[in-house]
Image (tube, grey):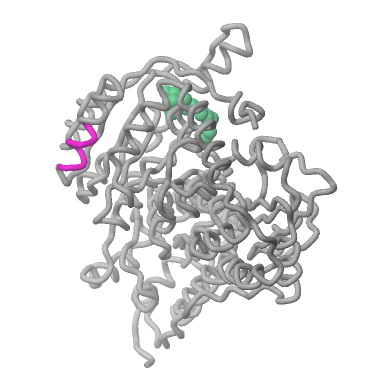
Amino acid sequence: MVERMTGGQALVAALKRQGIETIFALPGVQLDWAFDALYDSQDTIRIVHTRHEQATSYMADGYARTTGRVGVCLVVPGPGLLNASAGLATAYSCNSPVLCIAGQIQSDLIERGRGMLHEIPHQLEMVRSVTKWAGRAMAPGEVPGLVAEAFRQLGTGRTRPVEIEIPPDVLQAQADVAPADVVGAPQRPNGDPDLLEAAAKALGEAKSPIIFVGGGVISAGASESLRELAELLQAPVVMTSNGKGALSSRHYLAQNTVGGRTLLPESDVVLVAGTRFVPGMNQNWGLRPDQTVIQLDIDPEEVGRNVPVAIGIVGDVKQGLGELAERVPRHNRKRDSRQEELAGLKERIDDLLFEVQPQASFAQVLREELPEDGILVNESTQVGYWSNLGFPVYQPRTFLTSGFQGTLGYGFATALGAQVGNPDKHVVSVNGDGGFMYNVQELSTAVRHNIPLTTVVFNDNAYGNVRRIQKQSFNGRTIASDLLNPDFVKLAESFGMEGIRAGGPEELRTALQRAMKNGHPALIEVPVGEMPNMYHITRGGAVRR
Ligand SMILES: Cc1ncc(C[n+]2csc(CCOP(=O)(O)OP(=O)(O)O)c2C)c(N)n1
Ligand SMILES: [Mg+2]
């Protein structure tokens, strides 16, 4: 039904039609008419306002990745959008469905270079670097279609952030606006049946198949099919840190990348599903030409990008793995259970990881205190690096990383968003003192919006990772890596939040129990010394076969 409304009202109506219930936002003059429209809709759309735009996009990402629903952030143009861009880059690297709504300068002055408030040239082109699609509305009547297209993009193919922008005069202007159709279920093409059959045959006939998976299995909701296929093939499932939870860590077939390095050389057919298949910084997996690679991915550009593939299947990973599980039995060898052998390998890797102290003991306490469905949001800090490999994850969407961006400082705000999206689950944010202070101002957001997140800060008064590398590689010449910190407990208290200091793993346990019970945000500071590096393990070759 056509209705007379402002562009701002058209925006809010379109978001409501898509079922949006939460927006992470920071206002400003170009957005006044959007916020005034949101004022009237506070019973359906909750506004969580932050203290810096970077937190709006991080929170939208944390919300999106843990719920599978679209996370929305709303920011002013120019500096506001630039501030949000590290969060968009992180969401981009983690294939997260984030919708960023940005302001613009007055519509008839765009790209004139007159120096209007918050003007940056080529804003739309700039944001395309960290989104899969971006668009602009130049009249209120265009707003519903723009929002619908944004949701179509979010639900089609590989999920990645998108951006829309609306100039202030368009948000203010009144017009007769017709609603656009609601975008329905995600449109994700099915894989080619002939290729799936060829893949099923190769896997079924393989002597020692192996499966590598990443976050794509989690965003596709393909865990069940993955487990079924892996069990049929008795194939180990190697999960990247972003793919943790695709198969429960309790399963004997579930392996981390250390296990992957150990098992890959003896595998003849390698199924790569929903992962870029890149082991880490400037390394490759060291495949041999006699190993057959089958790759399944929703993104055609990803197939064969990093390794040559014998069979490349473009399609939805859930449908593809389901089809493979259905087709493999017709080709499958008789296979004995590899439980004893692979559980043994896991144990040896766990023993090796447990030698990395104190990281292992801290992470173990975190796992023991976090419920089965609790969510851990990781960071670029010593206990975090350890967790990428060693932290057991039992369910999809319960372990977040910053993906290939490795964005220091993303964690605390991302965890706040995860907690907003999962009010009934326990969420724990792991931080170093360096990374935590990137978003320290959001302590205010946690209290203001009563987001009951438990935040742990491992404090070594340093960019510890950098300092250790400097010491080891540059003969003790450390520079720009020592940090001066506030008293974190007092800082938390000054925001009106519970602050607890924990001297070691067992005190961390008690602190976590207390924090998770109180139903309010809490910060736990853990003073620590320098921790050992674990490159000898991540680089591989450390485990005997
Ligand atoms: C945006 C960004 N800037 C800089 C870095 C480089 N970097 C990686 S780890 C690190 C230090 C982390 O310090 P802290 O959070 O205290 O953790 P710690 O290593 O001390 O445990 C830095 C500066 C990065 N990864 N991302
Ligand atoms: Mg530190």
Toward the viewer: 337 or 483?
337
Which picture quadrant has residue 217?
Answer: bottom right
Q: Residue at x 56, y 67 (%)?
A: 318
Q: Quadrant of ligand 2?
A: top left
Q: In this rendering, would 519 be left or right of 276?
A: left
Quadrant in the picture for the N terminus: bottom left
Using the image, determine if residue 433 lies above or below residue 245.
above
Question: Can residue 502 be found in the magenta stretch?
Answer: no
Q: Position of residue 384 (x, y in %)?
A: 45, 33
Q: Position of residue 138 (x, y in %)?
A: 51, 74
Using the image, determine if residue 146 lies above or below residue 522.
below
Looking at the image, can residue 84 be seen?
no
Q: Position of residue 198 (x, y in %)?
A: 76, 69
Looking at the image, can residue 141 be seen?
yes
Q: Residue furthest bottom?
A: 1
Using the image, determine if residue 162 lies above or below residue 483.
below
Which picture quadrant has residue 23?
Answer: bottom left
Quadrant in the picture for the C terminus: top right
Toward the viewer: 490 or 242?
242
Q: Residue at x 27, y 53 (%)?
A: 425
Q: Residue at x 35, y 22 (%)?
A: 459
Using the image, determine if residue 16 lies above or below residue 221.
below
Boundaries of the magenta span: 511-517
Q: In this rendering, would 23 be left or right of 88?
A: left
Which picture quadrant has residue 333?
Answer: bottom right
Count of marks overlaid on the render: 0
Q: In this rendering, would 272 be left or right of 23?
A: right
Q: Position of residue 497 (x, y in %)?
A: 18, 37
Assign the magenta stretch its main secondary structure.
Answer: helix
